[in-house]
Image (spheres, grey):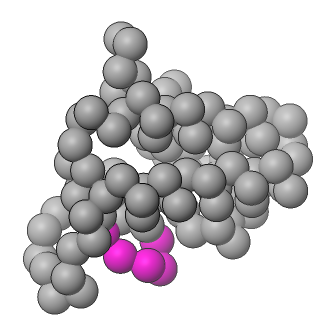
């Protein structure tokens, strides 16, 4: 799968990475539910660092469609709430729970 980090770039990851990505995504959802901006920023940092660590960064001139797009670390609670509402998924930013 290809994940785009907003304002940064694209990364290729495999489905084997879903458990670790979903653990980070759960923290994003918890921060949004608690309306805790500091926790959200920390959770987004963790998610993006995990994407960078596990993924293979694609060149800037690559023209591949992204399967998922995640906000950058500067996203606000309102930004992420809107993002989650627009996605129509109850699975957070990273759909496809590995245990489902």
Q: Is residue 19 left or right of residue 60?
A: right
Q: Residue at x 21, y 74 (%)?
A: 58
Q: Which residue is drawn at 38% across and 13% down?
A: 99
Is residue 74 or residue 47 the one in the foreground? 47
* Residue bounds of the magenta highlight: 6-10
Q: How many labels does the image show?
A: 0
Camera-side residue of 29 and 57: 57
Side (left or right) of 23 relative to 1: right
Residue 2 screen position, x and y as percent: 24, 56
84 up-or-down from 78: above or below:
above
Q: Farthest residue in the front direction? A: 53
Q: Is residue 8 above or below residue 97?
A: below
Q: Is residue 65 above or below residue 99?
A: below
Residue positioned most to the left: 63
Quadrant in which residue 19 is drawn: top left
Along the horizontal axis of the image, is 76 left or right of 67?
A: right
Q: Answer whether residue 9 is magenta in the image.
A: yes
Image location (x, y in percent) of residue 100: 36, 11
| Residue at screen point 27% across, 33% down | 16
Could one spot residue 44 in this view of the protein? yes
In the displayed structure, 86 sits above or below 88; it is below
**48 lies left or right of 78:** left
Residue at point 69%, 71% (across, down):
74
Residue at the extreme bottom of the image, as rendered: 61
| Magenta span dominant secondary structure | loop
Can residue 85 be seen here? The reply is no
Q: Is residue 47 a member of the stretch shown in magenta?
A: no
């Amino acid at each position: 799968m290809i994940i785009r980090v907003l304002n940064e770039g694209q990364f290729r990851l495999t489905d084997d990475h879903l458990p670790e990505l979903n653990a980070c995504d759960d923290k994003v959802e918890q921060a949004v539910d608690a309306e805790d901006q500091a926790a959200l920023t920390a959770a987004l940092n963790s998610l993006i660092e995990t994407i960078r660590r596990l993924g293979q960064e694609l060149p800037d001139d690559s023209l591949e469609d992204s399967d998922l797009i995640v906000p950058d670390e500067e996203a606000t609670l309102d930004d992420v709430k809107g993002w989650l509402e627009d996605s129509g998924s109850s699975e957070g930013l990273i759909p496809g729970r590995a245990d489902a």
